Amino acid sequence: MALTTQQIADVRRFAGYPMLGEDTPADDSRDFAYGFVSPGVWQTLYHRLNNLTPENESTLITVYLTNLYTLETAIVSASANLDTAQASVWVHNPTEVSDRERLFDKWRRRMCGFLGIAPGPALGTGSGARLVRC
């Protein structure tokens, strides 16, 4: 079983890499994202996603994608409470959206680590340090 094209697009998006279009194809030798395999050997994200073992594909879908969809939706849903500071005994957490965004980004970085791919430009490393491939 292979990942769907939507799942592949979502992995790229969650990893912080730009979308691909008809005029910017990815393949085994060109992509915006590369992962270190062994000394002197690099693979594209495209290659990795299209050559996952069944066990790793299952982990990617059930552990990472499923949870990332939920976490992403929760950020948007949290905006429904931004206009209310308190309602009866319920008190709004003023840092709820940023807390949810941090958790979402943490899981995105964990997925990158699982795939062996550095976080993309839209996600960054989260540490202030930057890895540059020469």
Image (spheres, rainbow, N blue to C red):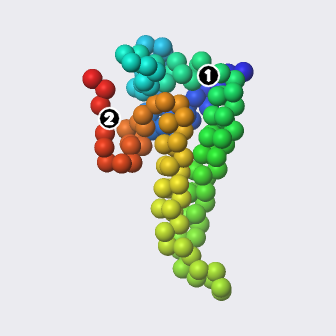
The residue drawn where x is 64% and y is 46% is 67
How far from the left and from the top, in percent, is residue 89?
65, 85
- In the drawing, what numbered circle is on residue 52? 1
Dots 2, 1 in contact, CB < 8 A? no
How far from the left and from the top, in percent, is residue 16?
45, 38
How far from the left and from the top, in percent, is residue 109?
48, 42
Decide which of 13, 60 is in the foreground and name it.
60
- For this orientation, the residue located farthest to the bottom is 88
In the image, taking residue 125 as reference, residue 82 lies left or right, namely right
In the image, taking residue 70 as reference, residue 42 lies left or right, namely left
Does dot 2 land on a helix, a strand or a loop?
Answer: loop
The residue drawn where x is 44% and y is 25% is 35
In the image, taking residue 86 as reference, residue 133 lies left or right, namely left
Query: Which quarter of the image is occupied by the C terminus?
Result: top left
Which residue is denoted by mark 2 in the rendering? 131
Mark 1 surroundings: few (<14), some (14-19) or many (≥20) residues within 10 A: some
